[in-house]
Image (cartoon, grey):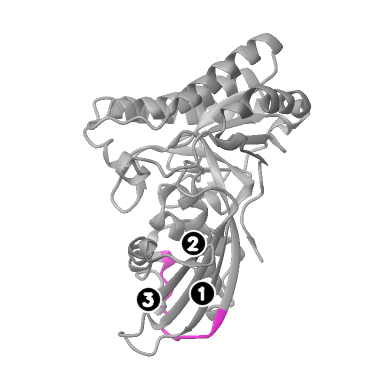
Amino acid sequence: MEEKNFIFKSSSAINHRATWQAPSNIALVKYWGKHGDQLPKNPSISFTLSKCVTTTTVEFTPRLSENDPWFSFLFENKEQVNFHPKIKQFLDRISIYMPGIKFQRMSISSSNSFPHSSGIASSASAMAALALCLMDWEKKSNPVLSDSLFKTKASFLARLGSGSAARSIEGPLTIWGENATFKNSTDIYAVPLTSKVHDVFYNFQDTILIVDRGTKKVSSSLGHQLMNGHPFAENRFLQANDNCELLSKILVNGDLDAFIEVVESEALTLHSMMMTSSPRFILMQPNTLTVINKIWDFRAATQLPLCFTLDAGANVHLLYPETHAPAIKIFIQEELSQHCEAGQFIEDQVGQGAKKL
């Protein structure tokens, strides 16, 4: 589908209220590096999560004049003007595809079920939830809008706020970015994987170890920019495409050893790009490395299919089949929780995507 197909030209202002809950997602094949208008330099594949969510409510009322504030924003019930530039940038970008939104006054209220800006893709769930509320407004103005186009355009719009937000609309697995193995894949929105996925990946667990609750020292936006001119960038983009092809087969055949190899390689490659950019930076913390080594030792000793992945932060995502959860959760509690800030970890699992509340 082309971008021009997403333009909805209604200019009527209406009263409307929408609440959507959108999940975070964890990439198995990582997206790092972008170009143009939030387009990825390489494709990525992700699990949609279930419990790590952003819940957003938008109250739409007619905007009386251009001098009337376009929007207000509450985060965790507190006014947060520091988020305004990012929200305004997003609304400016999407107004091409929703011209009527300029005639609306929007009161936005949002909350997270997990720590903000700590490497659990909070911008992904936040922008996905906001995009879905905006699509809810469009659906009100255009009742014939199909459910399929609703979700596709929501992914398209979410991408304009945060690239990985494109992957937080549907579940349990999505691909964003064009790759020859996935015939319907595209750079402008994410699509759910339609091939038969092996049963082992349904109800797959993701326990997130909160190694560091603090805000990242280097934002993902800046990190993506540092891939421009990176000495290893082109080979990295090729590697990601190859790993998407590998993972497409693994997700069907259920080979967990191969799954672990791809997923952990992707996680460490992502952070190696950070450590070799100019300027270079490190988001992992000492406890991140301690946890990784303990996972490797545990897997070698037990032969249980526990693996890790990392987002752009210090926290560690532990991925494993539900059938092995009892033994692995004991290991987490007894061996890994001590390396978490205040012993905190989040028990999550693969989810089915966003939902209207």
Q: What residue is shown at x 49% (from left), y 26% (from top)?
A: 288
Question: In this rendering, would 161 be left or right of 336?
Answer: left
The residue carrying mark 3 is 99
Q: Which amino acid lies under the numbered mark 3 shown in the image of this protein?
A: Pro
**Residue 202, image x and y in percent?**
71, 37
Q: Is residue 153 magenta?
A: no
The residue carrying mark 1 is 138
Q: Which amino acid lies under the numbered mark 1 shown in the image of this protein?
A: Glu
In the figure, residue 252 lies in which quadrant? top right
Work out which residue is located at the far top of the displayed protein and give it.
301
Q: What residue is shown at x 62% (from left), y 45% (from top)?
A: 49
User: Quadrant location of the C terminus?
Assistant: bottom right
Local SS, label 2: helix
Residues marked 2 and 1 touching at CB (< 8 Å): yes
Question: CA separation, marks 3 and 2?
Answer: 15 Å
**Pointer 3 or 2: first along the chain:** 3
The residue carrying mark 2 is 153
**Residue 211, image x and y in percent?**
52, 33
Q: What residue is shown at x 54% (from left), y 39% (from top)?
A: 26
Q: In this view, does 208 lie above or below 117?
A: above
